[in-house]
Image (cartoon, rainbow, N blue to C red):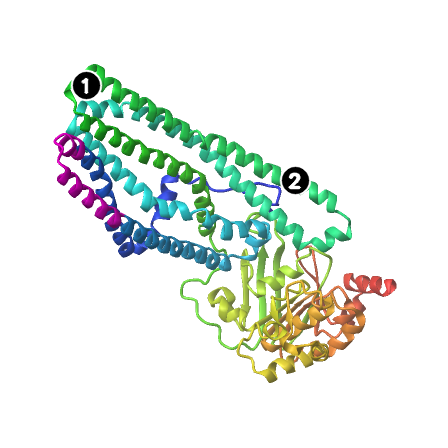
Amino acid sequence: MAVNTARQDELMREVPKRETLFRLYRYLFDYKKELAAVGGLLAVTLSITLATPLAIELAVDQYVANEDIAGLLTLGAAALALFFVYAFCTRQWMMLMAEVTNKVLLTIRSQLYSHLQTLSFHFYDSRPTGKILARVVGDPNSLKDVLSDSVTKLIPDLLTIAGVSVIMLVKNWQLALAALLTLPVLCGGMFVIQSAAHRRWQVHRKKNSNLNAFIHEDFSGIRIVQSFAAEPEKTEDFRRCAKEYRDSYVRAVRIGDLFGPLVEITWGVGGFLLYFIGIRIVGADKIGVGTFLAFSTYLGMFWSPIRNLASFYNKLVTNISAAERIFDILDTPAEITDREGSRDLPAVKGDVSFSHVDFAYTDEPDKLVLKDVNFSVKAGETIALVGPTGAGKTTIVNLISRFYDVTSGSVCIDGQDIREVTMESLRRQMGVMTQDTFLFTGTIRENICYGKADAAEEEMIAAAKAVNAHDFIMEMEDGYDTKISERSAQLSIGQRQLLAFARTMVSDPRILILDEATSSIDTHTELLVQSGIEAMLKNRTSFIIAHRLSTIRSADRIFYIDGQNIVEEGSHSELMAKHGAYYRLYQSQFLEA
């Protein structure tokens, strides 16, 4: 199975930027009423903005030139009223757009989280958790300004440019063309800059993801780091990741920052051409002072939104890679899904069968982990799986839970292919205990009742007593309401394991899987919990993976797994009598003891 590490850049599909943008903007279209209201408010503010230079021209060429004080005061009062209208409309559209943008981000983040919940173990096994966190937490935040500015700046600025261009062409086409001569140069330069900048921002996002993955991995394993006094090496690794992150940012910004100077230069040249052509070619005597002032104002109104557009374009190029990374996750297909027409699995007895099962990971289809595995287990039987590391024991139990799908063959429960029933109804009737005990941040009560939120107090206590966890829980200050965390130091590894046992016990599964479930418990604690395990196994079909062979001697049958298949099968006494692989494994442990 190929694995991406914190030191490797992620591979992503190449998707046209236009497709990514259209897909992103579709989220905005879910809020048509709000966007229509924003559009109306923007139309009012834009109209006021476009009318301002005409008011200046009127004031200079009519009222000032004719010394019409009354008309000038009337115009000033109207302008003041329009200012208050402008301020009110601006505040309203800003508040509306902020609300819409945050709703869109919530939708995107919720879709990401929901989709990630459906992805198989293979997805999580093949990449660091930190890289997944970067896509759920960091990348959506980068889209906030892009979404908001697309409505509040992109559209108004484009309309402003169009409106100003029309007004200038109507008033004096020669001056208008003079002011717009440098526009083609600007467009060509922006295209060249964005092409180079987009590639650099893609690299920067990947380096950011690497840094997140490294930090998450390092702090998750901080006990190991400190145990081996590896702080200097890890600090050096961090500096290397942080330097790559910084350097990728600097390279991207150096290109992106060329947008500003390009706009300023073309603006300056355009202004020069306006006055040069206006004075030397058209003739200053043919153009009124008010018209010149109006054109000067319109020139600023024309190039200012272009500067804003260049800034928005730069922001778009900077952050579109975040949208690409989000959609890359959303487009990752869930390998394990409910098939069309799947039905709920009714309450099961617990018969389990494998029929000609082959299994290989999807990214290594030619490398079989299991080959032609066949067995049948009756309801209530306890099956132990033993064998060398990597032989496929955990793979077998993962196939029963349908954490992976078989490559060929079938896995059936009570005669029903598990691919034909819903995953929720299948897993609801299974209890899985692994050697990697995970506790959620919360109370002991919440952790035990995780698999059955409506469990009664008596059920919870009975489950804890059955695995000998009740006594140490009651010795804690707040008993079952004691708050614990994922890595709570107030619990020993053995105690954490017992809480996980109680969590499995309270859900009352019909099929039980214990994958090295007692590996973290000392021998004394194991003796205490053994009676609890026996209670859990009663009337349940159970699969136990254990390296301590003393814990599985009472199993109904033992499967010795090696070479992609079951090479020996039988009870403990039967396998010992064969003097085969199981006998040699048991003897080696006995001699070590």
Task: Using the image, tell me which numbered label, if any, was put on residue 284.
Answer: 1
- N-terminal of the pair, mark 1 or mark 2, is 2
Task: Using the image, tell me which numbered label, if any, was put on residue 299.
Answer: none
- Magenta stretch in the rendered image: 58-86
- Name the dominant secondary structure of the magenta segment: helix
Q: Nearer the viewer's eye, disc 1 or disc 2?
A: 1
- Give amino acid for label 2: Arg
Residue, x 25% and y 20% (percent of image)? 275
Q: Quadrant of residue 265?
A: top left
Q: If the image is split into quadrants, where does the C terminus sit? A: bottom right
Q: Residue 27, percent across and down?
A: 35, 52
Q: Quadrant of residue 519?
A: bottom right
Query: Is 80 inside the magenta-drawn segment?
Result: yes
Q: Residue 219, percent across and down?
A: 66, 53
Q: Residue 263, percent across and down?
A: 36, 29
Residue, x 45% and y 52% (percent of image)? 330
Q: Nearer the viewer, residue 10 or 369?
A: 10
Q: Is residue 63 left or right of residue 250?
A: left
Question: According to the image, label 2 marks what residue?
Answer: 239
